[in-house]
Image: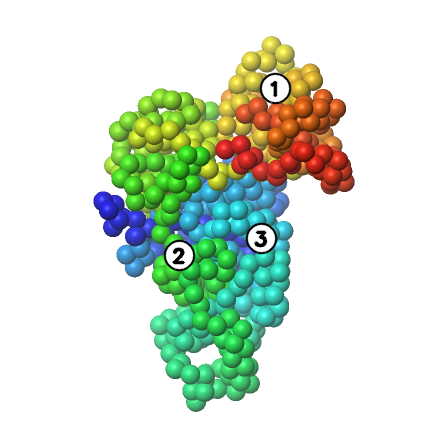
Amino acid sequence: MKFDGEIIKRRTFAIISHPDAGKTTLTEKFLLFGGAIQTAGAVKSNKIRKHATSDFMEIERQRGISVATSVMSFEYKNVLINLLDTPGHKDFAEDTYRTLTAVDSVVLVVDSVKGVEEQTRKLMEVCRMRDTPVIVFINKLDRDGKQPFDLLDEIEKELRIHLHPLSWPINMGKDFKGVYNLYEKSLLLFHANQKATEDDIVPIKNLDDPSLPKLVEEKNAIQLQEDVELIEGVYGKFQTEPYLAGKTAPVFFGSAINNFGVKELLDTFIQIAPIPRNRETNVREVDVHEEKFSGFIFKIHANLDPRHRDRIAFLRVCSGRFERNKFYKHVRLEKDVRFSNPYSFLAREKDVIQEAFPGDVVGLFDTGNFKIGDTLTEGERFYFTGIPTFSPEIFREVVNKDPMKTKQLEKGLLQLTDEGVAQLFTQHLGNRKIIGCVGDLQFEVIQYRLLHEYSASVQFNSLPFFKACWITSDNKTKLDEFTRFKTANVVNDKDGHLVYLAQSEWFLNTEITNNPDITFHFSSEVHK
Ligand code: G4P
């Protein structure tokens, strides 16, 4: 079909990890291979360092960096790669979850010393919701980490995904010798602090090759033979279908900082990672090959600098060709909109673009027309699904310190929550406003922005809730009854849907058991 040539060239993905596992380092190495940057250290980490948790200016500085590196597009071996960055700090996890709705696959980085960590688990849960294909990169092999078979077991068990190693390490830490590529049947030799070159790749026809003990020492050669025999026996031949279905994750071992095993990962990635795929809407599946344009907004970035009060909405193209200056339908607002300065994120430059294709991400200047999940089409009415909102983890009541500014406060709260900075809930009785966030930092951001952008001064009071569940039922009487009895705990989200706020796991489980007619959902997707 018309845009097939463009579609098969594209791979849109994200690198995700628990903070400090090596996401930024790996990103940088990918960009070096893609020629998007020339020197190591050119990509500033967009993570907010631990010591900066209460330093607001630091947050803003980091946010500035993060928008510049939000999408990094580069070409590698004629493949156009769109790498979507995700914030490393856990307080901005919502942002990461939403970015994952816009990618077609992910590379998950695991620290070989620490194994599976809290964020690794959460991120994997989000990937599982959409069966996103995952490649695992086990990093920091230059350190003494957990044994590779133990790591595989741990990851399989904790992340509930089948693994299939495509490379295998020979020792680790100071005895690290290199990795054997099970896919290409070649050996990559490791020299600390030295960039791996083509000369370090030794093709090995079989593991009885007499050169092997010379290259990696005899005991390591024997160990490798045993390991590979075991792996081939257990895992068999690698198949791409289970990977593309999100059921099996290929695994690579390496050391990002030493640029070791990274090229192998990237080379395999461009071979097996999915091209942009069809997407579900509330009406029908949109075929990526359709000629008519469609796309959705997955992220909104507001500039906190009052001199540049611009917002950038990130649009993921799902089908057809997006064109500059052409009118498109903004489905929620039922109006036609056009964009005179859409830009792409090629390398580090923001370039105004004329067109974009499925898999691409376009930056649109926005004056407040968009909220997360908004869909643009060439006239058809549908919404892309699979852009859920998850339960916040911290809840606070909003206390208006300046009643003269009530209107500004309401407007500010609505706009900030449209951007996805936080979730807003309203209690039935007394119209009390509750903000839910994933981390403390967001409350700081909200307080600051309400004051500086809307002249509204607020204070937050802690509330004893730990989870929000969207509630639905076929039995209206039962739902009404529950809502009436639990007035202190039942609130409305911004779209008017009923939400139960639970004080603890015990309360939640009790309500679930006591109210079999009511379904408790852990994401808002049910309403789409
Ligand atoms: P993140 O984005 O996932 O949070 O991780 P990042 O890449 O910033 O890496 C976290 C730390 O781990 C960094 O050290 C980085 O240099 C180190 N690192 C990354 N890959 C490897 C590896 O293969 N081996 C070893 N030994 N370390 C690795 P840092 O001291 O926290 O930061 P920096 O001062 O080096 O930037």
Image coordinates of residue 167 in percent, x first then y, are 47, 70
**Identity of the residue furthest to the left in this view:** 2
Tell whether 308 sits left or right of 467.
left
- The picture quadrant where one finds residue 79 is bottom left
- Looking at the picture, tell me which residue is in the foreground, 134 or 528: 528
Front label number (1 vs 3): 3
Q: Amino acid at mark 1?
A: Ser
Q: Nearer the viewer, residue 207 or 214?
A: 207
Q: CA distance from mark 2 to mark 3?
A: 20 Å
Tell me which amino acid carries mark 3.
Thr
Q: Which residue is mark 1?
A: 457
Please determine whether, in this image, residue 315 is positioned above or below residue 397: below
Is residue 222 visible in the rendered structure shown here? Answer: yes
- Residue beneath disc 3: 120
Looking at the image, which residue is at 53% across and 36% down? 525
Image quadrant assignment for residue 380? top left
Residue in the foreground of this view, choosing between 322 and 3? 3
Q: CA distance from mark 1 to mark 3?
A: 37 Å
What's the coloring here? Answer: rainbow
Q: Which residue position holds label 2?
A: 273
Separation of disc 1 and disc 2 at Cα? 48 Å
Other residues around mark 3 within 10 Å, as few (<14) / some (14–19) / many (≥20): many
In the image, what residue occupies the spot 67% across and 27% down? 479
Q: Is mark 1 within 8 Å of ligand 1?
A: no
- On the picture, is 374 further left or further right than 56? left
For disc 1, the neighbor class at 10 Å (few under 14, some 14 to 19, many from 20) is many
